[in-house]
Amino acid sequence: MSRYGSNKKTNQVIEFGGFTVIDGKNYRHALHDIGKGILCVEPTELNEHPEEIEWSSDFICPYCGHEDPDAFELSDLGETECSACGSELEYEREYTVEYNIKPIKCAPVTKA
Ligand SMILES: [Zn+2]
């Protein structure tokens, strides 16, 4: 038994990387022991035809929903692979500007 449930045997040849659907539930490949013929999977979301994610403050994979905390290491524009599911992604980093304003001295006020 794995921590996610039971083991499942299959004679199907499954290439490592990507998703596997077992009994209607979606899993992403986490680990592959070729010698023992074991493929470990983790439950995941799967959207095979996702919409573009816009104006998100987090780097989220549209295919599996994984949030990449290391996305700040990426350049401002380019292509990358989701570190969880391996899907190919194109991204663009947007910057927003915010101001902090501290009051120092009010201009003279004349009360007439
Ligand atoms: Zn993903």
Image (cartoon, helix red, strand yellow):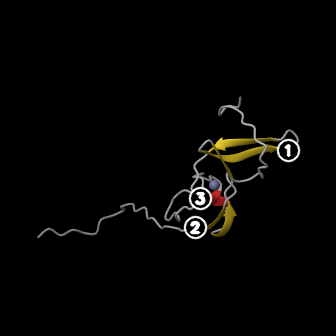
Amino acid residing under circle 3: Glu
Q: Nearer the viewer, mark 2 or mark 1?
A: 1
Amino acid residing under circle 2: Arg
Q: Which residue is mark 2?
A: 93
- Give the mark, 3 or 1, whose residue is nearer the N terminus: 1
The percent coordinates of residue 96 (x first, y second) are 49, 67
Residue 41, above or below 81: above
Label 2, label 1: how far apart the Cα atoms are: 38 Å
Residue 8, above or below 24: above
The percent coordinates of residue 73 (x first, y second) are 67, 60
Q: Secondary structure at mark 2?
A: loop
Asked whether the residues under the numbered discs 2 and 1 touch, taking CB atoms below 8 Å apart as contact, a structural biologist would say no
The residue lying toward the viewer, choosing from 71 and 12, is 12
- The quarter of the image holding the C terminus is bottom left
Q: Secondary structure at mark 1?
A: loop
Q: Residue furthest front?
A: 11
The percent coordinates of residue 109 (x first, y second) are 21, 68
The percent coordinates of residue 104 (x first, y second) are 37, 62
Q: Which residue is mark 1?
A: 34
Asked whether the residues under the numbered discs 3 and 1 touch, taking CB atoms below 8 Å apart as contact, a structural biologist would say no
- Give the mark, 2 or 3, whose residue is nearer the N terminus: 3
Label 3 CB-ligand 1 distance < 8 A: no
Residue located 36% across and 61% down the image: 103
Amino acid residing under circle 1: Ile
Label 3, label 1: how far apart the Cα atoms are: 27 Å
Asked whether the residues under the numbered discs 2 and 3 touch, taking CB atoms below 8 Å apart as contact, a structural biologist would say no
Query: Is residue 5 found left or right of 47 in the rendered image?
Result: right
The residue lying toward the viewer, choosing from 47 and 101, is 47
The residue lying toward the viewer, choosing from 58 and 9, is 9
The residue lying toward the viewer, choosing from 38 and 64, is 38
- Give the mark, 2 or 1, whose residue is nearer the N terminus: 1
Q: Secondary structure at mark 3?
A: loop
